[in-house]
Image (cartoon, rainbow, N blue to C red):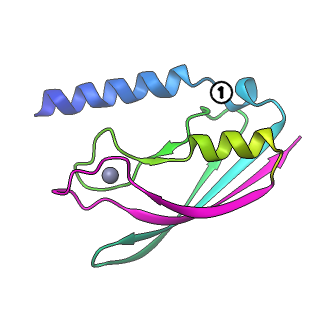
Amino acid sequence: MIRVKNQAREEHKREVLSAGLLAERFPAVSGIVVRMNYQRGRTSALQRTVNFLPDSPAFFRISCLGEGCEGGGLELTWVIQRMIRERAGSMQGELRCENRDEAILHADVDYSVAITYV
Ligand SMILES: [Zn+2]
């Protein structure tokens, strides 16, 4: 079990590294702020903010924080790529964790993305 987890973590590390830096992938972007409102079953709503700066990895799958959730996450890659292509400043929506293992309490979130450009 521990071995599987380590492998998942190594895999995740590789994915993050291969994504490159925000400044390299999207030089027109000066910053991205993702705000999430977690709805997690019985747990009261959790507010979470994730900031991306030019030296952050351009990796936009955000952990769902579900206990034991490996390989899932909240996939914002397509949303953010499309926003940058259209030079959009803000966007809102809803997301579910990509991992659908029902033994784990995954997160549903309402999110907003704000992007600032150079
Ligand atoms: Zn999850």
For the point 83% across and 45% down, which residue is it? 87
Residue 108 is covered by the magenta coloring? yes
The residue sitting at the left extreme is 1
Residue 46 is covered by the magenta coloring? no
Residue 5 spot, x, y in % from top left: 21, 33
Q: What residue does disc 1 label?
A: 21
Relative to 78, residue 51 above or below:
below
Dividing the picture into quarters, in which one does residue 28 lie?
top right
Left/right of residue 86 with respect to residue 93 in the rendered view = right
For the point 27% across and 78% down, which residue is it? 42
Residue 25 spot, x, y in % from top left: 71, 26
Q: Secondary structure at mark 1?
A: loop
Residue 71 spot, x, y in % from top left: 32, 38
Question: How many numbered marks, from 0 up?
Answer: 1
Dividing the picture into quarters, in which one does residue 10 lie?
top left
Comparing 51 with 81, the one in front is 81
Name which residue type carries label 1. Leu
Neighbour tally class for label 1: few under 14, some 14-19, many 20 plus, Cα within 10 Å = some
The residue sitting at the right extreme is 118
Left/right of residue 64 with respect to residue 91 in the rendered view = left
Q: Which residues are magenta?
A: 89-118
Quadrant into which the C terminus falls: top right
Left/right of residue 85 with respect to residue 105 in the rendered view = right
Residue 1 spot, x, y in % from top left: 10, 34
Relative to 9, residue 79 above or below:
below
Comparing 116 with 89, the one in front is 89
Left/right of residue 42 with respect to residue 86 in the rendered view = left
